[in-house]
Every structure is written in structure tokens, then in C-alpha cells.
Image (tube, rainbow, N blue to C red):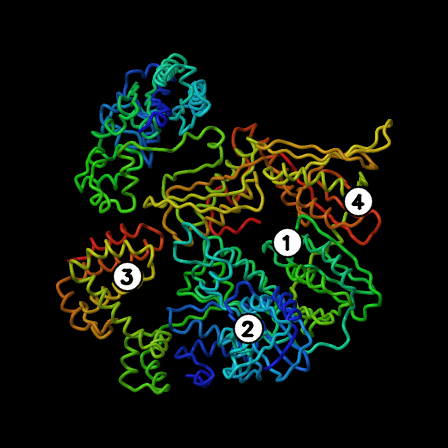
Amino acid sequence: MNEWAANSNWPLVGHAEASAAVRAAIVQDRIPHAWLITGPEGVGRTTLALLIAQALNCERQREQRPCGTCDSCKRIAARNHPDVLVADMAWQHTMVGSGSGERAKVRQRFSIDAIRWLRGDIVMRPIQGRWKVQILDDAGLFSHDAPDAFLKVLEEPPPYAVLILVAESVDQAPETIRSRCRHIALGLVSAAEIVSALRHRGVDAEQATQLAQIARGRVGWVFDALHQPDLLLQRRVALETAFEHLTTPLGRAAITGVIAGSHAKKRDDTYTLLAHWVGMWRDALLLQVGLGDALHYPELGARLADWSARFDVPTIVDALAATQRCLHDLDTNVQARIALQAMVTRWPS
Amino acid sequence: MNEQQHNRWIIHADLDAFFAAVAVLERPELAGLPVLVGGSPTGRGVVSSASYEARAFGVRSAMPMAQALRLCPHAIVTGVSSARIRDLSQRFQGILRDYSPLVEVVSVDEAYLDASGSERLFGGAEHIASEIKRRVRAELGLVVSLGVATNRLVAKIASELDKPDGLRVVLPGQEAATLAPLPVGSVPGIGPKTAARLRHYGLATLGELAAAPESLLALVAGEDAAHLRRLARGEDERPIRGERDARKSIGHERTFARDRRGLAELEAPLFALCQETGMALRRKGLAGQTVCLKLRYNDFTTITRQLALSQPTDAHQQIFAAARALLSGALHERAAPVRLIGVRVSNLAQPALQLGLFDDRLQRTRRLNAALDQLAERSGGPVVTPARYVRPAKNLEVDQ
Amino acid sequence: MRVTCNQDDLHKALGTAGRAVAAKSTMPVLGNYLLEAADAHLTVSATNLEIGISCTIPATVDKPGRVTLQARVLNELVANLSAPTVELRQEQNPLTVLVEAGHSRAHLRGIDPDEFPRPTATLSDEPALRLDPSALRDAIAQVVFAAASDDSRPILAGVQFEARDSIVQMAAADGFRMSLRTLPLDEEVRQPLSIIIPARAMSELQRVLADITEPVELRVTPNASQIVITGPAVAFISRLIDGAFPDLKQVVPRQWNTRTVILREQLLDATRRATIFARSSNDVVKLEICPADSGLDMGRVTISANAADTGDNRDDVDAQVEGGEMQIAFNGRFLHDVLSVIRSTSVALELQGPNSAGVIRPVDSDDFTHVIMPMVIGS
């Protein structure tokens, strides 16, 4: 692990290699105009993007950047810097609205209007810092006509401009955009690294181990959970609900009835449930193939094992595929009732 | 229902086995024989029309040609000249327009006519329908089936009831009763999947659907319950859209013999479609400001994406630039094999080109297209295609 | 902070600075005013990061300090105070301010003033330029409307501002038309200047200048990222656009085939009427220019438009025409825009042909040139 990453100004847990690459770029002053940071949600993608922005605009000497203590670093951490913009879906909703009608119902994507806004903003020189930084959080979600508009910025960035795209996977970005970016891939953070980071913050060993296990590499979630104990409880409730829906006949009836009915209003709830079902089928599969120590839901313990023992591997694989298919169908705006029903009928009973 | 609502009279006119009938007109020796018009028996050819003699063997239009030939091995497969089709279709529409200015052409062989108000001139709607039937036979040598009713939904169904050579009038108030014995799938708007689902719940006929308890219907159809019930009762408020509205867009589409995948394979056919659309716009002296792309994937999900241009255009180059951007975006969202691709330009107006200060590309394009159109006029089709779109090629770059 | 000031002064200052409050932002502090009390002055500032406006008013400062307060609430509150003086006093909790006027007392919660964007870097004492506010305002009005209003080419959403010798030249173009305006200076420019100012900022500056009578000073920050224009009690800050502006002088046609001199008001009125009919046909307004017949002493311009659904309209206006007859079509809104900002009684319309750029300029002055591209109808 490099020293810099161990530096307390570098609040990124894990990702030693990525940290070293960023550090090298900053120290050698070879700054790419466009970065693409990929990885699962919660592993520290946005944290790394903000760290890059801090390092670029830090008021200290190059070797000490980012110091984390100067006005610039503090403003960036507080997302309050005039030259550093974090554009995410909430930002888009505030700045350009989310449109109306059919398209707005689909899960949000960066609209052409948002990209045009960003283009209009990037041509204005930075006020306080040396660099103007735009962080596109969840850049995997460009609407169909946005990538072309965005490409124009990437092709001719102003000399002071740095664009940081954050996405789940490199496939989400169109090739034309991908090829113009410096790619930094972040993986899941190991449980050991999370435990060590938690211990460092004074969490006792037992709780740290427990949190790290539930977090499955998503550091962001662990820190959220530390600050909001409710999150653990909410997760527990969501998990039990999902398990009940999965395992009881009445629960399944509710999936197509109640859940499909409320889907229009509470889309996020449906997605959370689906994600849990995917995880549970995956756990069932892991149990079947004897990998019970790599479970996503250790807290369900024997209950999941007892229930899923009667299904064979092909059956579970099929159920898992059906669940993922349903997620995809909802994304492409298939009627919720139909998508959910199709999924449930392919689940074994 | 009060009297006032009954003053609408809609006629649905549908030429019987149109393409097959035209084939027989072209080759009179085929009269009385099973005739199939359509694509080749190999590949994805389908029957576009079958004579009633062939239908007796169970052949239906849209059936794969190979299957049709298994059912009716001695059928004669033929093609028809598109000029002949166009000519007869226009004369058919001409006859309809003699009776009402409000004619909505659905396809070459099918149209709705709003005869409300025309009755006073020509004597009742039924009389108009029988006049149409007589003239179509005498002037075109074709057979037409007609449905007369108070709305388009019932008129459409009525025209099917006595096919071929039918004429069915559904009197005001008789709509629901006429529909009641029909299977649920016979209403346009209830697809095979919905029909199967309705049957599963014991709702096999439109009468049963119309009378189904509210709670059952809500369970079966959810939000669509009210709509389904209106369909089953033969209620339909949609107006007949006349010529002016119907021409509000121009476009072309193409179904592939083999599914295509990726930008590289789809770009060339898309360019050809844009070229046809641009030529059609210029021929009619129109320009459009909205470009709409349609894709049907191999699982039959169909998507449309549209883009508004900064000013109306009749240049296929601009239509293609927009359509290609939409295609690239759509394929990025979902890269499945594509079965059908289409482009459509709407928001039509007289072309009025605002020239630019810094570039004269638009004007140069305009002159180029005028020259291309002249060439095409002489040779009967688009002749000049940029080399890269002649055949699908790999790694195409954007044409600026 | 503890400060007392005149209610009317404060109300005006809030109104002026309020034009820079961010209507939409993900940074809450940009929805607030920054209030700073020091040296017998109260300064009210607001910014949306693109522009910033500060107004300074005289005040009795008992205790200097800084606070930020929600712009909308403070503005409405002060507008509705009836007492002649207002006192602002920071409470025990430094983020809370007591606003007291007569018998009215209100508590407002603010945001930490350190979150407010920093003021600009130190500026030179000597300004780059001194300008007469009303002349600057007129010049902005003649140029700013020609800038691009969409974001398709961000640089064209700016106004090019150049100063050299003893002349300022401003230019804007949206790709279909352009305005070029020169403004003479009283003194020689020491350091030539070439910057691009966002058109939105120019429009706001135009409004701010309306209240100013004394000359304003213009400075550019050392890193060329912002422009600061200061008047006696107001400072206006705008970000600058980076990039190369197209060479607009290249676009001005050097010759004409038909030159028409026409009463501006008459042409403007006729254009207004034509625009009513042009609305549904892409705003196409047609001009037919006929030179004087041998028997007539005046030529004529016919302004017409038609709409398929609405009807059509024609206006004949007398004019002096040099050269041959000409038919040309323009976007009626573009014509209307430029004719509304010219001050002279007569304008000259210089045309080469129906597919080439036309020039419109005042007859009595050569400080303004507008170039407008025609429209081509039919195929």
C-alpha cells in the first residue's frame, strides 16, 4: 500500500492501485482532461472524484495536495466550491427539471438539456481555483441523445477543464466517450480493509466485522450506517420483507398485486426488493455449490439454506435469470404487473 | 342514449383480398384458382394476400409463405405491379371521396369515411355504402366489404362480419348486441395476449366481457379495465382524420429478411430510408422539423425515439444525421438484433431555410439534393448513395 | 454584526443585488444575500456563480460583521417594513439575525457566511477602462440580442468585447445574424483588451447601469476569469467565456447591388404586422424592393407574409432605392429585433441578392452594423 493512500488526507478506503495512479498524475502534473471512474455503487467512486478535484485545486504545494484543510479543499468536500460541480440526478432535477410525461417515468438519465447546461458552464473559466471540474455522477445513465452532445466537450476541452465521469461499469459509457477518458476501475473493498478503516475510527472489533460482512465491499454504505443506525434496521426490515415475499405463497401473491400496484408511486422500493431477491437467489446458488461462506445475507443464515435446499441448481439459475430479467424489463418500461408476474411464475415453489 | 349522439355515420371500406384480386385482374387466367401474393417461399417471405380460393385451405395473410404452401401446395404464387396497386388504390379512394370530404386512408385497401351529413345529399349511409360497392365493382373490377355504424370501431368489425362482398349496417343502439357473440380477440385493441388472459378468466366473448363484474375486470386488466369494457360495448369516440391531418408525417420503414445487429449493419438501410423520406418530402414540397426513429427488436418489442431539429428540413443528410444519432443512442440502451427499422419526419411545413452566417453547408446540400432528385427522376429511384452506405461496412464514422 | 440603515436604501440595494441571486442551484448559500457591515457601510451581495452584484449603502455600524440571509424572505420582509430605519443585529446564535424596524421584529436564520463564494482576487487600482453608463447601456442593447440563446455553440452565447486605441468594439452573433457596435472612449486604452462576456450577464449589466449616472470603471481579474464593473455604490462581476470568437468582420459584405433607405418606424410597423401572419410559417417575411419608376420620385418596399391557415398581409412603404429591384425573405423576428434597437430615423438596407447576407445600418452614424442572413423558401 502506498504511503500517500495511508495519508489521513486521503479518506479513500482501499483502492491502493487507483490511488497511486491518481497521485502519479497529480505529482507529474499530467492531468487528463477526462476521467472515467467505474465500480459498484458505494465503493468510493464519488469520494475519489472529489479527491481528484481537491488535489487539482488545493492551495498547498503539489506534494501535499490534497491537504484537506485549505479553503479550496474544505469547499470541495462540502460541495460548495464555485469551480467544482457534482452533477447527479438531484442536480439535474434542480437545474434543468426532469421533463414530464412518459420519459420522466423511466428511471432518470442525464438529459440533453443537462449536458447542454454543462457545456455552457465549462466554457467559463474557473474563478477560485486553477481547474474547473465537473463530476458526472452516474454517467452510465445518458439519455439516448446526450452522448453526442457530451462528446463535443470531450473533443475540445478548454485548457482548464477536467471532467470526471462516474459509472457502474465501463460498458455503460459509449465507446466514443470511453476512448477519450483515463479509466480508473474500482473494485469492491476487502472486508479486512473495511474492518481496519472502521477500527481506525474507533469502532469495536465485533461491530466492525459485522458491518464489513454486510457491506460486501461497499464502504459508502458502512459509513452511512455508522452515522445513521436506522439504516441497519431498515435493511433488516427490507430483508425480512423480501424473504417473506420469496418464500411464502401469500407473499408471492402480494408481489404481483400489491407491489405492482404501488410500483408507479414507489419505484425505488420495487428495485430494492428486486435487488434483494437477486441476492437471495444468488445465495441459494452459493449454498447449493458449497460456497456458504461467501453469502450476501449471512444474517438470514439457516433459514435461506433450509428453504432453498429442495431446489436443484438449474432451477435456481432459472429463477435468478427471471429475477434479473424482471429488473431489466422494469428499466425498459415494461408494465410492472406483467414483468413481476412473469418473474414469479418462473420461481420454483 | 339520446338522438343527438346518433348523427354520426361511419363507413369502413375494406377491399377483399386486394393484392390477389389485382393479380387476377392482371392475369385473368388465374380467376377461380388459389392465388397467393407475397414474398418468396424461402427466407422470411409472408403471404401479403390470398384469394378466397386459397383461404379455403386455411391460408391467411401474414402467414409465412412456406407454411401457406404446405397447406395449399398447388397455389399459384405471384407478384403484382406496385404501379397497378397504387393506381387502383387511388381510384378506390377517389370513389370514397365522392361521398365525403372526411376520408381517412388506413392503407392501400382500407379506409374510413365519415358519412355524417352526407346522408342528406346521397340518401342514408346504407345507400352510400351500396353505391360504393356497386361502383368499386363496375369501375375497378374489385370487391369491397363495408361496415356501417355509429363509430369506427363498430364499422370496422361490421365490415368483417359478412366478408367477402359484405355490407353490414349496425343500427344505433345495436352496437353492444352485435358485438356480444364475437370472441374477445376480434376487437382491434385486444391483442392475442390480452385475449388469452380474458379467456383464462372465463371471458371468451365480447358480451361476457361487457357484462363482467367490475371487480373481476379490475383483477384481470387493472388500469385497462374501463377501456376494455368500452371496447366490448362497441363504444368509440375517435374521429375520422381527414386528408390534412393524415399527411402530418412522411416516413418509410423496412423489415429485414434476416435480423441485423449493431450500428454498422443498420446504418446503410437507415440511410436508404432517409433518402427515400427526403425525396418524398421534396417531391411534395414539404419540410419537417421532427425526426422519429422506429426499431423493432427480434422479440417484437418496438421502440420509437424522436428528435426536434432547429429548423424544418427536407434534406436526407440532416434527417440521417438525426436518425443516426437516435439509432446510436437506442442501440446503446439495448443492443438486441433488429427486425425492423423505420424513419418518420413530422411537424411538416413549407420548407423555409434560414441560411447561416458562418457556413453555407445547408445551401450547398440543398443544391446537391435538387441535382440528385433530377437524376433519380430519370432513373426511377435514388441513384447516388455515398459509397460507405452502399453495403453495410464496419467501423463507419459520422458523416459531418 | 449590528447595523442600522435607511429602509428605502436597503430595499433598493436588495432589489439590485437580488438580480444575481441563483434561481436554481444545488448550493443553498447561493439563494442567500451576503450582508457585510464595516466602516459606516452595509454591503449587500449575491451571486449565481455566473454573475455577482454588490451594492453598498451608508449605515451606522455598531459592530462590524458578516451574515448571509435567505434572499427571498429578506427581500419581501424589507419591502413590507413601514418604519424609515431598519436595524440588523446578529443574535446569540451567530447564524440568526434580528431585523427590527419600528415595532416590527423578525428573526431570520442564515447560513455560515464562510460558505459564500469568495470575493474576487485583488484588483488593480487603475481600471482598464472608464465608460459612460448610458452609452455603454445603448451599445449593449444593440448587440446583446444577436447572441445565441441556445447552448449549441456555447461561445456564441457570449458578447465579444474588445478595447484598443480609444475605441471599444462589441460584437455578437448567433450563426444567423450579427451585431457590431463601436463605442468611442474619452481616453486612450493603455492595455488592449479582448474578452468574451456571457450575453445573459450583459443583459443584467444593462439593467444595473440604468440606475447609474457617473462613469463606471471596468477591470479584469489577473487570471482573466472575471470582469468587474464598478460604479459609485455598486459592483457587477461576471465570469468570462474562454475560447476563440469567430472573426465577425469577415462576415460583413463589402458591396451591395441594391441599397434602400427607409423610415425605420414605418419598416418596423410593417414588419410587426407581417410577423403576425408569419408566425405559423417559420416567421418568413418577404421584402420586395422596387426602384423608382421614371414617373415616380420614390421607390417602394413591399413587406408581406402569409400563413396557410390564417391569411396574408402586405404593406407598401416608400423608400429611396439605389440599384436594381430585389426580392428577399428574412426571419421577421430578426428584422423586428434589429429595427427596435436602432435609434436613427432612417435605416439603410444593403443587399447583394436573395441568397446572400444583408446589412442593416443607421443612416446618420457608422457606429453600428447588423448583418442578417436571408431565408430561402420552397425548393
Which comes before the other along the chain, label 2 or label 4?
2
Distance between the alpha carbons at the discs numbered 1 and 3:
47 Å
* Disc 1: which residue: C148
Distance between the alpha carbons at the discs numbered 4 and 1:
24 Å
Q: Quadrant of the N terminus of chain C?
A: bottom right
Distance between the alpha carbons at the discs numbered 4 and 3:
70 Å
Q: Is residue A244 left or right of residue B167?
A: left
Q: For residue A129, say whether it is visible.
A: no
Instruction: Work out whether disc 1 and disc 3 sit on a shared chain.
Output: no
Q: Is residue C58 left or right of residue A31?
A: right
Amino acid at dot 1: Ala
**Mark in front: 2 vs 1:** 2
Mark 1, other Cα within 10 Å: few <14 / some 14–19 / many ≥20: many
- Residue A18: give x, y in percent of width and height: 44, 76
Amino acid at dot 4: Val
* Disc 2: which residue: C104
Cβ–Cβ under 8 Å for marks 2 and 4: no
Label 3: element kind:
helix
* Disc 4: which residue: C347
Label 1: element kind:
loop
The answer to which quarter of the image holds residue A218 is: bottom left
| A245 or B275: nearer the viewer | A245
Instruction: Work out whether disc 4 and disc 3 sit on a shared chain.
Output: no
Distance between the alpha carbons at the discs numbered 2 and 4:
57 Å
Label 2: element kind:
strand
**Mark in front: 4 vs 1:** 4
